[in-house]
Image (cartoon, rainbow, N blue to C red):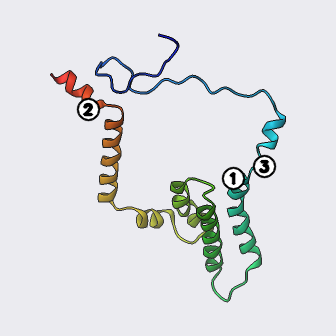
Amino acid sequence: MNGDHTPNLNSDDPKTPLLPVHDPIPRSPSSNSSLISLFTPNNFYILLGPLLCTLICLLVKLDAPVTSIYMLAILAWIFSWWFTEAVPMPITSMAPLFLFPLFGIASADSVARSYMDDVIALVLGSFILALAVEHYNIHKRLALNVS
């Protein structure tokens, strides 16, 4: 076995592990390079969203309710993350779930209701389960155990 611990995912043997086994991630001993690696453009883009939100909340004055300013600030935050792709798109798209209740724009329940219906959650969950079954060849393992 030449040290390779990754299983063959196309194997029909029901005794092979379902999840791949990986070696631990090697860490570099240098501490100076880790400090320099903190100042990357991606980290700046991640902080750009909250920074824009703070600036808009502090500097923009509108003749409207304060929630309008908060909504504009959250829009700038999400737009900056979307435009720069600083964080993955699923996180960017779910940001209003925690930002709207945090700023008092809407309750978490009403925001979550606008994202998903019960039927959509059921269908989405079944698709995710089907992808996992297909990815790890569980359908083949079940067929081999039945026959």
Lateral position of residue 49 relative to residue 105, left or right: right
Q: Residue at x 64, y 70 (%)?
A: 76
Instruction: Give coordinates of residue 74: x percent, y percent.
Output: 62, 69
Residue found at x 65% / y 72%: 73
Q: Is residue 47 above or below residue 27?
A: below
Q: Are marks 3 and 1 in contact (CB under 8 Å)?
A: no
- Picture quadrant where residue 71 is located: bottom right
Instruction: Write down the residue under mark 2.
Output: 139
Q: Determine the secondary structure under disc 1.
A: helix
User: Where the C terminus falls, by quadrant?
Assistant: top left
State the mark number for residue 39: 3
Q: Amino acid at mark 3?
A: Phe
Give the secondary structure at mark 3.
loop
Residue appearing at x 81%, y 37% in the figure: 33
**Three-letter residue code for mark 1:** Asn
Splitting the image into 4 quarters, where does residue 7 fall?
Answer: top left
Amino acid carrying label 2: it is His
Nearer-N-terminus badge (2/1): 1
Would you say 81 lies left or right of 7 here?
right
Instruction: Report which residue position mark 1 lands on.
Output: 42
Circle 3: is it few (<14), some (14-19), or many (20+) Cα within 10 Å? few
Q: Who comes first in sequence, dot 3 or dot 2?
A: 3
* 50 on left or right of 35: left
Q: Position of residue 49 (x, y in %)?
A: 68, 63
Q: Position of residue 63 (x, y in %)?
A: 67, 89
